[in-house]
Amino acid sequence: MLAALGHPQRLRIIARLAEGRVHVSELARRVGISRPLLYMHLERMEKAGLVTGDLELSPDGKAMKYFQLAPFDVRLSVDTVLDALLADEAAQRDEAARMDQGSRNDDREGPDDMQEPQS
């Protein structure tokens, strides 16, 4: 949850949603960011349990996505911060290992990569 709260844009989104439920296009205008970027932030916030989103049909049949704040209470302690830091460091190590493994796989020559000798 700390990671979801640890971004200035997400704090701005929370501030706007504190005013009440809002359609995603209107929220993007209020926050001053693109809808794709807003969706990226909202997805992270939804996974953390900070917001909820609902699809509704407008009278003309269009799907409308609305978001609102979910009730949450955050309490910080030194242990909470240290646990979040350790989890973040582990995630960074895992990502670095995946990237390293991927680059090693790219360096290997497979049967399709080998060139046939020219006669």
Image: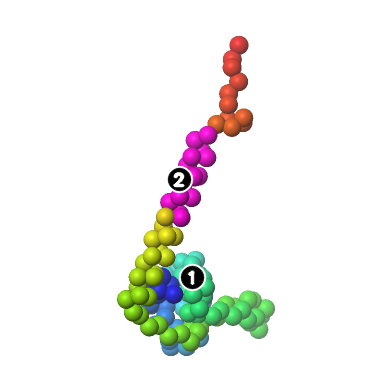
Nearer the N terminus, badge 2 or badge 1?
1
The range drawn in magenta is 94-108
Residue 50 in view of the camera = yes
Please report the residue visible at 51 percent of the width from the left and 38 percent of the height from the top: 106
Query: Toward the viewer: 38 or 26?
Result: 38
> Which secondary structure lies at badge 1?
helix
Q: Which residue is mark 1?
A: 44
Query: Toward the viewer: 16 or 119?
Result: 119
> Which secondary structure lies at badge 2?
helix
Please report the residue visible at 51 percent of the width from the left and 71 percent of the height from the top: 43
Q: Quick one: label 2, few (<14), some, or many (20+) residues within 10 Å? A: few
The location of residue 23, given as percent across then percent down, is: 52, 80
The location of residue 114, given as percent across then percent down, is: 58, 26
Q: Is residue 58 magenta?
A: no
Which kind of residue does numbered mark 1 sit on? Arg
In the picture provided, is 39 more to the left or to the right than 87?
A: right
Q: What is the number of the mark on residue 100?
A: 2
The chief SS type of the magenta part is: helix
